[in-house]
Amino acid sequence: MSDSRYQQLENNNNQRLDELASKLSTFRQINSDIHLQAQDDMGVLDNLSNHFSSLMSNLKNSSTRLTRSMRAGTGIWKMVGLALVIFFVLYTLYKVF
């Protein structure tokens, strides 16, 4: 092989190697970006999970307290219901006339 042919092949190989290194660098950057985005998303999901757990706990506690209060004072609930019915009847009559 002549030196010029060898030099041409060597330059061609170096060019392809540079292109491959560039592509590899791009893939590494994409991989890093995906990793960072996945970490951010996991943080958001963990935060969301904690909020839903807190919401469920609060809802359960509220439901327990409501059930307890309804069992304790049925007379009070009847009076509140009657007051609401009277209010809506008077409100409706006021709007009609």
Image (tube, rainbow, N blue to C red):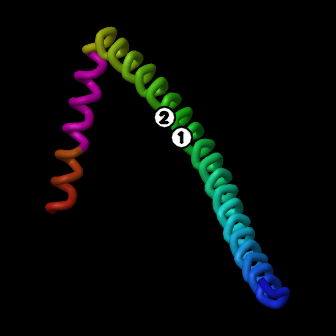
Where is mark 2, residue-wise? 52
Q: Secondary structure at mark 2?
A: helix
Above or below, 85 relative to 41? above
Viewer-nearest residue: 2 or 75: 2
Q: Which residues are magenta?
A: 75-87
Judged by its main secondary structure, the magenta piece is helix
Q: Residue at 79% x, 79% y: name it.
A: 10
**Occupied quadrant, residue 19:** bottom right
Residue occupying image coordinates x 82% and y 90%: 4
Percent x, y of residue 47: 59, 39
CA distance for labels 1 and 2: 6 Å
Q: Does residue 66 appear to the left or right of 47 in the view shown?
A: left
Examine the rendered structure and indicate whether residue 24 appears above or below residue 59.
below
Mark 1 surroundings within 10 Å by alpha-carbon count, few (fewer than 14), some (14 through 19), many (20 or more) = few
Q: Residues within 10 Å of mark 2 (few under 14, many from 20)?
A: few
> What residue occupies the far front of the structure in this picture?
1
Taking the view exactly as shown, the residue that stands out farthest to the bottom is 4
Whether label 1 touches label 2, CB < 8 Å: yes
Find disc 1 in the rendering and name its residue: 48
Which one is in front, 23 or 62? 23
Residue 27 image position (x, y, % from top left): 65, 63
The quarter of the rendered structure image containing the C terminus is bottom left
Figure quadrant of residue 81: top left
The amino acid type found where label 1 is placed reads: Leu
What is the number of the mark on residue 67? none
Relative vertical location of residue 47 with respect to residue 73 in this rendering, above or below: below
- In this view, the residue farthest toward the right is 3
Q: Is residue 90 above or below residue 58?
A: below
